[in-house]
Image (spheres, coloured by chain):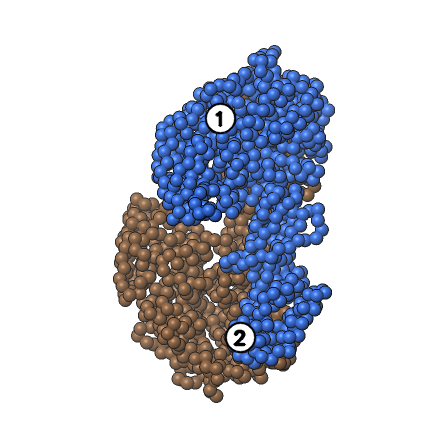
Chain colours: A brown, B blue
């Protein structure tokens, strides 16, 4: 049900339809971040020829009273208004519309020609204005009453018409509209998060490999020592795979071997052992106190720690013993392990969300989030949420947010589109995407157009990852170091949120476990690795420049302005992002071919970018620092994979200074 | 709110989203006609990898119990089901989905290879099947219990696998699904009307001009005499402008003159005089009893009489005296007439729907509909509904339909798109359209694509009129007789419902009141006219053939299959309609140029029309009777305006007879 009129009031003549933003008829909130200006549009109209007025009503969930701002008519009965969100949490908003008799009267009054007609119409207007006076107080009331009286008394038609069309008095009267028969749309919701929910560069690393001594298990202290490096590269979020005790029963060995050697570290996602589960820390990493210290140290580097939440258990997780009812039993009495017949994953016990004690399970899992929030974590990367009930996530995220509206949830689900959209709608802040497998121009344009123009734009925030510990794409395997550079620039500029799994990424680690596999050989998931961060061929320098460009250019900090432009070469991809006021415009041209130089003519839509097509403009290339003078929409670009995978242009307009010389800003 | 799960039941794992048809999130019903098969689609999915099942539930409003039919999966979690509507009135429907443990078990069971694994899994299946047996009765219960027992007892893995995958037993078990944790979408509504709401040819005529004696006012008896003519032309509905007493005060003269001559007939839309109003009949036409007789006579010719409902009053309408509170007063005490300053329409008093006595006004206007239903009318053409509140129409139409679900409402509103769509959504069966002003190929393709593919397809049924008493388009004024032929064929084939204002149309009446006007000179709205139906240049013969083709070809009786095809000449328009089973396919090619012969190559999408591109097919031209053998998608067409404005092909497939010769059917 998308509307609430005045039930039982047949004199409600205005109608409000098709309010945007709106997700599934109001079933889910749209999403914004703090500081956003929310544009609200609606179809507003009434029967007949009377003028109408419309307004957006909104309030933060903590407020009782509605705030209000007038809407203005666009075309075809579409109206637009706006409000700014300054607090975290849920906002409620709606649109109200009503027949505005004063506005109708003035419009008609201006068109009247016959003096008698004007004199009679003046009396009609006087009555409408007197009614407005009755709704006003103090000096406004007096002033409006005086206006009405003069319209009643004046006899000269020309003078009457001037008086009736007085603008300041009309504006005053508009402040006391007659809304007894107004139409109010059903309330809608908007969830406001902090900026990091929309914009951030993520760096994933395994603490186990953070030790400077080859072969020694890394610790949280080692991660602390790595913080300056990650910060220098310009990342905002440092994301750690699960940090909990790792199961010993059925532990997987190196390269996912079925049987582990005695010294194999096991997978961090096989959570839980005798010493603890989801609220404990793997002893080799340190203690909970060490972790808390890491969180604090990270803050000093403007880094936030994101934790991995994987709701599944190793066979020796304490839950299995303490809450046998949370797991499914096999007829032989053993606990049901994860399986996808004929494959078996005997090191993992999934929770049975259909168990009779599901409420206790839900509460305990919520408590896992709350525990780590207690230790300073505010960002969670949730593992495989699509294998747990949607209703659980909707409840758990709402419960966390009710207490901590600054919590951010990224979900890891590489699954079917509908499932991913449901997870995004029910509350997750961000989502992993299919980006890793979108390589060609056609694929990238289609996918990012869908993400930024489709209905998901109101709730689905992409976080683009060129690689993860599970995903080493063919493009990276075969494209060499230039391929990593291409994918980095694409991820960091197409998506306001992106991440890499390092140091594998910056060191262009690209050997698969076997031909055709997307898994890494000697993956850190199952063993420690020793990374040489100082290697000459590291992509750290490029990453630093790209992240610097992201921080310096607000255009790159949101996705809704993304626009693709034609290039006469299918290996070159050209697109731009801009701020709402077009003060900041970034144009990217990327060579998708990691093997060969490619050149072509790009064709920009200059008016869309706020550029006068007749005036030259400067293209400031942010990776090299070079500056080019371009003019007109068509310009030539040449990109050599070994030298530069992409141009990342900040567009600078020519400005005439006060001292009468031109410069670009 | 688009969904209702099991509130408080966290084990509800399936989800149903995006059910279609659905209008404004369920705020309004979708529309169908009796006999339709309603396809219902929805996104259905659950967390994890379990199989799900889904079904459509539906019931007629008069029934308590839901009926049910299984849905099948299409692509990407989209499911489809269907039900047939056999009764008039409202249907309720929804979609239910649930995790199907038996289906999941069987899918996995088929993939198991390890004998021990198979034996344990068989026990799991036995438990699921035993639970199904518990929900069954009688022999089904026994049979399922036996199946479970055998799965428990058998030890041979191969035999177990065969037993577990038994199809008939599985089908039996599916009849007793476990739906305790099912997800049910919010109920949606569908309004079912009789076929005439979707398909019908309308003929509008003024009874005042039906007299065979020039100068004598026509009567209902004269209209009776005209019935065979209208029926021979193949029309289904005979629509009469208002038949009520016409106001004398401020009566308009011929050609809308401000002052009427004493013998001027006045406009039928200036309703009401001393002798009666909306429930009375103009004495010159006859009596209410005569009207009832006309309605009955029309039925004998398979014609239905449609009445014009225009809710407005002449100054001498009895309502003005009896219910002064229903009208707005001017400050000088007179009643407010209709105006659009500086224009005044002093012969018309609009109702004031904001008056305090609005409930009584609504009841009285409803009673107008009920009065004429009492006299046998079931089809209403409603004049200018967009100048009365939407809420009134929604209520009034629902009240009429509650008593008379066979009532049909066509609304006349040539106004802004949003307003027209709202009227369609709130209950009107059909709408006038912008067809009269869509002349070029681009305009026609864009408009009819929007009508048949846009969201309005669920509720907005176009009724296409090439002319009306108010609309004589420039195309008709300047295109001569061929222009009328072109517009007839377009209206009658693009839209399942269409109408003409005759005899002006078939006699190609095309002189405007003044240059640039769309009004007729000497319009019947203000005077009697004498029409020579037997004129040699009458289009009656063409109309008869076109209406015959409409009746013979079910493809032309609905709009949802409309598809346009390319022609390499912008003056030629090519399109097709087909039945759902493609047993009946009609292809039209129309020459939009009324002045010159035009030729070109049409390019049909043969697979879309159910034609094997490798086999010749016959094009049976229904206006001329000619038959052409075509093969392949590209074929040549030449149309001369004076000879034939269009080809109306029935497509006949080649069929091999039992006696081994080919024929086309």
Q: Earlier in the sequence, mark 2 or mark 1?
A: 2
Which quarter of the figure has residue A476?
bottom left
In the displayed structure, would residue B536 be above or below residue B630?
Answer: above
B449, A472: nearer the viewer: B449
Q: Decide if residue A299 is in sight here.
A: no
Within 10 angstroms of label 1, few (less than 14), some, or many (20 or more) residues?
few
B137 horizontally vs A477: left or right: right
Residue occupying image coordinates x 27% and y 63% = A596
* Tally of marks: 2
Q: Residue furthest top?
A: B262
Could you say where residue B43 lies in the image, as x and y percent from the top left? 55, 57
A637, B175: nearer the viewer: B175
Check the residue under mark 1 and report the chain it is in.
B
Label 2 sits on residue: B112
Task: Give SS at disc 1.
Answer: helix
Which quarter of the figure has residue A614?
top left
Marks 2/1: CA–CA distance: 73 Å
Label 1 sits on residue: B541
B590 horizontally vs A333: left or right: left
Residue occupying image coordinates x 39% and y 84% = A214
Could you say where residue A366 lies in the image, as x and y percent from the top left? 60, 70
Q: Which residue lies furthest to the bottom in this view?
A: A262
In the displayed structure, would residue B562 be above or below residue A312?
Answer: above
């Amino acid at each position: 049900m998308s509307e609430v009129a005045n039930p039982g009031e047949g004199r409600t003549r205005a109608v409000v339809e098709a309010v945007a933003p709106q997700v599934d008829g109001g079933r889910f909130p749209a999403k914004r971040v703090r500081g956003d200006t929310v544009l609200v549009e609606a179809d507003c109209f009434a029967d007949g020829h009377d003028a109408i007025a419309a307004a957006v009503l909104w309030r933060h969930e903590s407020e009782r009273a509605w705030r209000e701002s007038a809407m203005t008519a666009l075309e075809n009965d579409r109206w637009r208004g706006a409000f700014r969100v300054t607090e975290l949490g849920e906002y409620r908003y709606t649109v109200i519309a009503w027949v505005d008799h004063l506005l109708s009267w003035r419009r008609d009054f201006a068109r009247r020609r016959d003096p008698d007609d004007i004199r009679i119409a003046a009396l009609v207007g006087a009555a409408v204005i007197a009614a407005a006076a009755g709704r006003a107080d103090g000096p406004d009331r007096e002033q409006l009453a005086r206006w009405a009286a003069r319209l009643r008394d004046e006899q000269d038609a020309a003078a009457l018409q001037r008086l009736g069309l007085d603008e300041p008095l009309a504006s005053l009267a508009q402040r006391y509209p007659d809304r007894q028969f107004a139409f109010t749309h059903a309330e809608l919701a908007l969830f406001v998060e902090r900026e990091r929910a929309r914009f951030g560069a993520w760096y994933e690393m395994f603490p186990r490999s953070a030790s400077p001594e080859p072969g020694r298990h890394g610790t949280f202290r080692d991660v602390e020592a790595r913080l300056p490096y990650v910060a220098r590269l310009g990342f905002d979020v440092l994301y750690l795979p699960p940090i909990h005790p790792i199961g010993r029963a059925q532990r997987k060995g190196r390269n996912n071997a079925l049987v582990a050697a005695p010294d194999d570290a096991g997978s961090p996602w096989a959570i839980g052992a005798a010493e603890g589960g989801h609220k404990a820390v793997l002893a080799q990493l340190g203690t909970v106190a060490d972790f808390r210290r890491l969180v604090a140290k990270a803050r000093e580097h403007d880094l936030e720690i994101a934790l991995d939440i994987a709701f599944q258990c190793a066979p020796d997780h304490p839950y299995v013993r303490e809450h046998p009812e949370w797991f499914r039993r096999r007829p032989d009495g053993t606990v049901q392990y994860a399986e996808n017949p004929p494959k078996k994953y005997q090191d993992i016990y999934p929770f049975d969300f259909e168990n009779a004690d599901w409420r206790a399970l839900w509460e305990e899992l919520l408590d896992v989030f709350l525990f780590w929030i207690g230790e300073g974590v505010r960002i969670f990367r949730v593992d495989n949420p699509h294998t747990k009930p949607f209703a659980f996530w909707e409840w758990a995220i709402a419960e966390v947010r009710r207490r901590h509206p600054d919590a951010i949830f990224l979900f890891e689900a590489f699954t079917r589109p509908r499932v991913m959209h449901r997870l995004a709608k029910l509350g997750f802040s961000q989502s992993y995407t299919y980006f890793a497998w979108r390589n060609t121009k056609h694929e990238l344009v289609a996918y990012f157009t869908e993400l930024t123009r489709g209905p998901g734009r109101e709730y689905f925030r992409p976080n683009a990852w060129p690689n993860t510990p599970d995903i080493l794409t063919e493009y990276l395997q075969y494209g060499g170091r230039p391929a990593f550079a291409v994918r980095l620039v694409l991820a960091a500029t197409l998506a306001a949120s992106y991440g890499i799994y390092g140091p594998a990424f910056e060191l262009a680690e690209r050997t698969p476990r076997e031909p055709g596999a997307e898994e890494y050989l000697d993956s850190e998931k199952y063993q420690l690795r020793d990374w040489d961060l100082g290697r000459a061929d590291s992509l750290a320098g490029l990453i630093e420049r790209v992240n610097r460009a992201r921080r310096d250019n607000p255009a790159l900090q949101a996705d809704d302005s993304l626009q693709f432009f034609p290039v006469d070469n299918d290996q070159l991809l050209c697109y731009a992002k801009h701020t709402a006021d077009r003060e900041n415009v970034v144009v990217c041209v990327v060579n998708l071919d990691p093997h060969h130089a490619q050149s072509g003519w790009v064709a920009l839509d200059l008016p869309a970018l706020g550029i006068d097509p007749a005036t030259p403009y400067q293209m400031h290339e942010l990776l090299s620092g070079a500056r080019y003078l371009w003019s007109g929409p068509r310009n030539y670009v040449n990109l050599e994979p070994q030298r530069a995978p992409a141009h990342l242009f900040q567009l600078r307009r020519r400005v005439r200074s006060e001292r009468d010389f031109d410069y670009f800003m």
